[in-house]
């Protein structure tokens, strides 16, 4: 729109009316001959257990997007009901159209990659051993504290653009590499700036409790006090976060410490999302359930009690298979979780230490190949349940009237299963984000 107004000012006044007509006209895009329109839900509910296998589809469909939102859809044979004025038409013959991925767990803002630790891991060091040597989260914190807000914004923005092209249509981003008041606030302000400028919805999570800074190694209460009395008041005043997160793990934050920190966050309006049961049976899942957390994330290390607690709750279990893959850990027990009736989401955990990839196509493929999720279960977990894990289910994650037109269009494929089956191939032809088209013919 701004483009048209600027262009108009460069021309004689008599042409301005023409530009205004263009500006005032709502942009409508019609997708026709869609082989399979998947994830169609008018009143989405959080999917748990057996419900995850049900992916509602319309075969041979059309979809109309108006002003960046879904304004109509249905079978091609009913396309006659459409308004006649359409700004652009895209033929989706042979292609599947899905809601864009909803990635509900990332650490997208970081100062530097950590390939040196990658080599250490190849040589045999564990994640915990690297952390003990001052590597891991501490390594990222040192680099983050040395970087400017602009540097952090610019590198995170490039990552975000890459993810959008890979099909991510909504994203959560955590702090947690500051580990002091100035660093955490710097990160959260960068996330806020991304939120304000991003073409996709962004949710912000405060993860000051990612690990204890070295100077508080033997003074846990001192750091908890800093989080509660120095960081949270500014975060609340500047509205810098939607959620509070704690790395509840042996050697990091205990369940009791997690509860104290999350209660402080909840008292200023932040719901919890917990890093739980990644390395050990840390009690993180039960703690998250007790806190009424929106989600407990990771879940590589589960037992029957943790599974039963999750199944009996409204908390979402967010599985991060690329983190398990990169750290050579057992994959999350998706089948047991689904069979027990849990609500499951899938996310990338994009971060420089345990998942240096935010590619949700790979997340979906791994969940099918290694965790035995059905393609329909994986798509649901990576779209509508991911949206629920960010409380964005009314905006994204499904095909429904009024939802954001944040969509994936695949290349011509025989079936939905081709997406995870052909892992490593990019089968996304175009990504639609509102009025913008990313892909071969687009931005
Ligand atoms: O989700 N587990 C804790 N936090 C991150 C990894 C952080 C890092 O290694 O930098 C995760 O895997
Ligand atoms: Fe994480």
Image: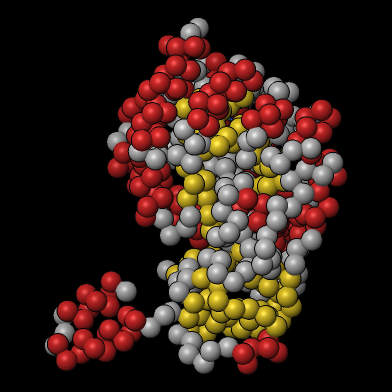
Specify whether 375 is left or right of 71: right
Instruction: State the image coordinates of residue 392 (x, y, percent, origin top left).
Output: 56, 53
Q: Residue at x 39, y 34 (%)?
A: 235
Q: Determine which quarter of the picture holds residue 282.
A: top right
**Res 373 seen here:** yes
Viewer-side residue, 417 vs 195? 195
Q: Residue at x 49, y 77 (%)?
A: 66
Instruction: State the image coordinates of residue 67 (x, y, percent, origin top left).
Output: 45, 74
**Res 333 seen here:** no
Number of numbered tags placed on the structure image: 0
Viewer-side residue, 13 vs 237? 237
Instruction: State the image coordinates of residue 297 (x, y, percent, origin top left).
Output: 64, 37
Viewer-side residue, 365 vs 252? 252
Specify how the rendered protein is coloured.
secondary structure
Q: Residue at x 40, y 43 (%)?
A: 191
Q: Residue at x 70, y 83 (%)?
A: 75
Please tell me whether residue 275 is drawn above or below residue 219 in the rendered image. below
Question: Farthest left residue?
Answer: 12
Q: From the image, which quarter does the N terminus lie in?
A: bottom left
Question: Farthest top residue?
Answer: 218
Specify whether 320 is left or right of 191: right
Instruction: State the image coordinates of residue 105 (x, y, percent, origin top left).
Output: 57, 42
Q: Determine which quarter of the picture holds residue 398.
A: bottom right
Question: Farthest front residue?
Answer: 267
Q: Determine which quarter of the picture holds residue 418.
A: bottom right
Please tell me whether residue 193 is drawn above or below residue 277 in the rendered image. below
Q: From the image, which quarter does the C terminus lie in?
A: bottom left
């Amino acid at each position: 729109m701004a483009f048209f107004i600027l262009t108009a000012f460069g021309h004689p006044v008599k042409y301005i009316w023409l530009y205004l007509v263009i500006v005032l006209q709502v942009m409508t895009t019609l997708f026709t001959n869609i082989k399979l329109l998947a994830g169609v839900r008018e009143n989405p509910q959080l999917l748990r257990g057996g419900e995850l296998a049900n992916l509602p589809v319309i075969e041979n469909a059309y979809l109309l997007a108006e002003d960046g939102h879904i304004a109509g859809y249905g079978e091609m044979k009913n396309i006659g009901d459409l308004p006649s004025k359409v700004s652009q038409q895209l033929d989706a013959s042979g292609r599947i159209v899905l809601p864009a991925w909803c990635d509900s767990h990332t650490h997208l803002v970081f100062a530097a990659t950590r390939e040196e630790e990658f080599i250490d891991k190849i040589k045999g060091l564990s994640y915990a051993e690297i952390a003990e040597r001052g590597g891991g989260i501490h390594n990222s914190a040192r680099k983050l504290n040395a970087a400017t807000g602009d540097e952090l914004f610019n590198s995170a923005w490039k990552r975000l653009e890459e993810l959008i092209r890979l099909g991510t249509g909504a994203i959560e981003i955590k702090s947690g590499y500051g580990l002091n008041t100035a660093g955490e606030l710097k990160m959260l302000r960068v996330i806020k700036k991304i939120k304000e400028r991003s073409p996709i919805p962004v949710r912000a999570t405060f993860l000051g409790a990612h690990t204890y800074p070295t100077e508080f190694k033997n003074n846990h209460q001192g750091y908890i006090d800093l989080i509660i009395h120095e960081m949270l008041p500014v975060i609340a005043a500047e509205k810098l976060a939607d959620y509070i997160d704690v790395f509840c793990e042996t050697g990091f934050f205990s369940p009791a410490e997690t509860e104290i920190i999350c209660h402080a966050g909840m008292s200023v309006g932040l719901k919890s999302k917990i890093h739980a049961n990644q390395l050990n049976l840390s009690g993180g899942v039960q703690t998250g359930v007790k806190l009424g957390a929106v989600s407990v994330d990771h879940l590589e290390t589960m037992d029957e009690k943790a599974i039963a607690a999750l199944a009996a709750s409204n908390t979402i279990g967010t599985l991060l298979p690329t983190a398990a893959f990169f750290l050579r850990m057992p994959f999350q027990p998706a089948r047991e979780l689904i069979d027990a009736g849990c609500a499951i989401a899938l996310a990338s955990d994009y971060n420089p230490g345990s998942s240096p990839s935010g590619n949700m196509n790979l997340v979906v493929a791994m969940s099918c190949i290694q965790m035995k999720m059905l393609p329909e279960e994986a798509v649901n977990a990576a779209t509508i349940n991911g949206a629920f894990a960010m409380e964005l289910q009314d905006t994204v994650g499904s095909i429904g009237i009024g939802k954001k037109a944040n969509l994936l269009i695949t290349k011509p494929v025989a079936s939905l299963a081709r997406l995870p089956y052909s892992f490593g191939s990019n089968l996304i032809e175009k990504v639609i984000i509102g009025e913008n088209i990313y892909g071969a013919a687009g931005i």
